[in-house]
Amino acid sequence: MAERFSGVVLRRDPDGNALPPPTMGEIGLNHFAPYLMNRVVARWNSNMSEELREYDLSTAKMRTLAVLSVSSSLTINELSVFSVIEQSTMSRTLDSLEDQGYIRRTPRPEDMRIRDVTITEAGREAFASFWPTMYDSFMRMFDGIDEEEYRVFTATLHKILLNIRKHEI
């Protein structure tokens, strides 16, 4: 799988219009960014899943607590988008986190159909206990990559996200 591709993947004319695409065989999987991103994310999720068992957390719970740890309050829809979890899975995840005492769902006074989700102190402590493990895994993933490379990488990911996003958040 270590094929070398010396052609142009992002084929555009001088005006930025797409030109006929190369074949997948011409590009090769190791030069096709969506394939590589899927491999990275799948490995990250698998590693996290193994590490989380010790903390009685699932990947969905960890993502939810991570997002809530940096947000004051979010609706279930917002939480689904930020944590990249389907709404049906999010509802079950929130039920479990609420049973564990890690989150609180509060109806909005102006619209009782909308629930604001906040992290509790117990939820902050649960996330804080796992955070060093998560950060260590993150650091291993970026071993040999300096801060400037990391900043360019995340800036590129933000551009890609803007190109493909469906939500304004």
Image (cartoon, grey):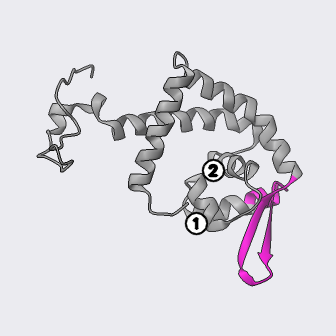
The quadrant of the image that shows the C terminus is bottom right
* 8 sits left or right of 39 in the view: left
Q: Secondary structure at mark 1?
A: helix
User: What residue sits 82% from the left and 46% below the top?
Assistant: 124
Asked if the stretch drawn in magenta spans residue 112, the answer is: yes
The residue under label 2 is 60
Amino acid, disc 2: Ala
Q: Give the overall secondary structure of the magenta segment.
A: strand
Q: Tell me the distance, in whole angstroms, between the alpha carbons under discs 2 and 1.
A: 12 Å
Which of the 4 image quarters holds residue 4? top left
The residue under label 1 is 88
Viewer-proximal residue among 90 and 119 = 119
| Magenta stretch bounds | 96-120
Q: Residue furthest top?
A: 144
Viewer-proximal residue among 70 and 148 = 148
Q: Are marks 2 and 1 in contact (CB under 8 Å)?
A: no
User: What residue sits 16% from the left and 28% below the top?
Assistant: 7
Percent of width and height locating residue 21: 15, 44
As displayed, is residue 145 above or below residue 68? Answer: above
Which of the 4 image quarters holds residue 133? top right
Say if residue 42 shows up in the picture: no
Which of the 4 image quarters holds residue 76? bottom right
Percent of width and height locating residue 161: 45, 50
Disc count in the image?
A: 2
Amino acid, disc 1: Ser
Q: Residue furthest right?
A: 121
* 9 sits left or right of 43 in the view: left
Label placed on residue 149: none
Q: Secondary structure at mark 2?
A: helix
Asked if the stretch drawn in magenta spans residue 21, the answer is: no
